[in-house]
Amino acid sequence: MWRNWAGDQRCAPAAVERPGSVREIAAALERAAAAGQRVRVAGSGHSFTDAACTDGRMLRLERMDRVLDVDRASGLVRVEGGITVHALSAALAAHGLALENLGDVDAQTIAGAISTATHGTGARLRNISAQVEAVELVLADGSTRVCSARDADPTAWQAARVSVGSLGVIAAVTLRAVPAFTLRGVDRPAPLGETLDRLEELGAENDHFELFVFPHCDTALTRTNNRVEEPPRPRSRASAWANDVLLTNHAFHAFCLAGRALPRFIPALNRTVTRLAGSSTRVDRSDRIFASPRLVRFTEMEYALPRERTAEAVRRVMALIPRRGFAVPFPIEVRLVAADDALLSPAHGRPTGYVAVHMFKGMAWEPYFRAVEAIMDDCEGRPHWGKRHFQTAETLRPRYPRWDDFQAIRAQLDPGGRFGNAYTDGVLGSLSNVRVEG
Ligand SMILES: Cc1cc2nc3c(=O)[nH]c(=O)nc-3n(C[C@H](O)[C@H](O)[C@H](O)COP(=O)(O)OP(=O)(O)OC[C@H]3O[C@@H](n4cnc5c(N)ncnc54)[C@H](O)[C@@H]3O)c2cc1C
């Protein structure tokens, strides 16, 4: 039985394999073909959707976690697909390099992170997949295909960067890293209305700006991370633990448990958490500022919106929660991301604002998420591929100007539909010739 991080997506693969090389991936694919099975690669299981699930053959790339090549001068770094973002960041730091932006955890594999267009925040910065220069795929017939930014026709590269596991096994990627940098991270509360009014401005003024707001509160918890020419000042282990684990996780967990047991107290609890949040400043290596431990289990939905509709969407979600009486002990999160050109990137072709809603483990999420999704639909939203949503290929196709180009590459690279699962059947549609030959 395989489970995702949140523990709410499970599957029983017919077989699980842990290949250690491209040749072993090809052999696993041959066995899948002989058994008439479809194939999924599971990364770290950090998707909230069933993106990695299969009842066919599951591949895990934990043994393919090496840094293969580092060119400090160009910043080009070639790594195996199973390396985690955490291990990659540590390896890059040892070479004086870093990824220009990260999400808020670093447990994902690099292949899993790019496959769903994992992003951080930064109005001028694109998602992680946009830092990918080449993707090395092992296709259903065991052959390898390199999709590179330098191809005469870059369409396959634009498809392979964000492909929800549907084109082949990502054995390796080449990323463009940047010189290592220090960030000053400042967390502080600010009035919500004013912060939303100034969202564009705050995005422009800061390298990385995001905000959290608890339902029933009129104070936003803002986070600004800016580059500084200072050496990192890492916190002591005790201080990091007190803040990241004790306060951010254990104390918050206690509030969530109280809210789950006594939902009518959630508005008061949310206001208390907001009051306790306070201000803090840290100066540290970029990856240590971006990512922090997440020990409280939850599920999540996140939508990519045209940037100019972000504040409106947040206001509508904030109004929806008391109106419909939803019990929500988790904050709404707002991040900004630059446009990119991956065919299935939710930020494809437009400056984007991401709005995320969460629900504590064991609490009803579906009515809340469906009501939020109606607002996101109305605001031209595109869902995060790794987070919950209720869209289908039919509802998604009109939202992606190059949807059909992606499908053409999919039909070309995986004509037999070997790399599908129930999730891709739903959100990408079955290829008309999806038939797994035994
Ligand atoms: C606590 C938490 C915090 C998060 N924070 C953020 C955030 O800040 N920003 C954000 O955008 N997202 C965030 N996410 C979502 C997460 O980044 C994505 O769901 C990401 O795809 C997970 O990567 P993974 O390695 O766990 O891959 P999985 O979830 O295991 O798989 C994701 C997809 O990638 C495919 N895949 C994985 N490896 C390969 C491979 N080698 N070849 C082909 N396909 C492959 C899988 O088949 C699947 O379709 C968060 C999730 C959690 C649980």
Image (cartoon, helix red, strand yellow):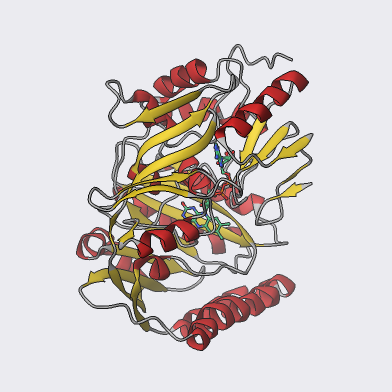
The image quadrant that residue 20 belongs to is top right
Q: Position of residue 63 (x, y in %)?
A: 61, 48
The residue lying at 27 percent from left, 21 percent from top is 152
Residue 51, relative to residue 46: is it above or below? above
Q: Position of residue 335 (x, y in %)?
A: 38, 58
Horizontal arrangement in the rendering, residue 45 relative to residue 218 (left or right)? right
The residue lying at 31 percent from left, 56 percent from top is 100
Horizontal arrangement in the rendering, residue 118 relative to residue 179 (left or right)? right
**Any part of residue 45 in sight:** yes
Residue 214, relative to residue 86: is it above or below? below
Residue 137, relative to residue 201: is it above or below? above
Near-viewer residue (215 or 29): 29
Near-viewer residue (214 or 344): 344
Q: Position of residue 308 (x, y in %)?
A: 29, 49
The image quadrant that residue 95 belongs to is bottom left
Residue 100, relative to residue 261: is it above or below? above
Total number of numbered labels? 0
Q: Residue furthest top?
A: 433
Q: Position of residue 58 (x, y in %)?
A: 69, 37
The residue lying at 60 percent from left, 51 percent from top is 44
Quadrant of the frame with the C terminus: top right
Near-viewer residue (352 or 289): 289
Near-viewer residue (406 or 97): 97
**Any part of residue 346 in sight:** no
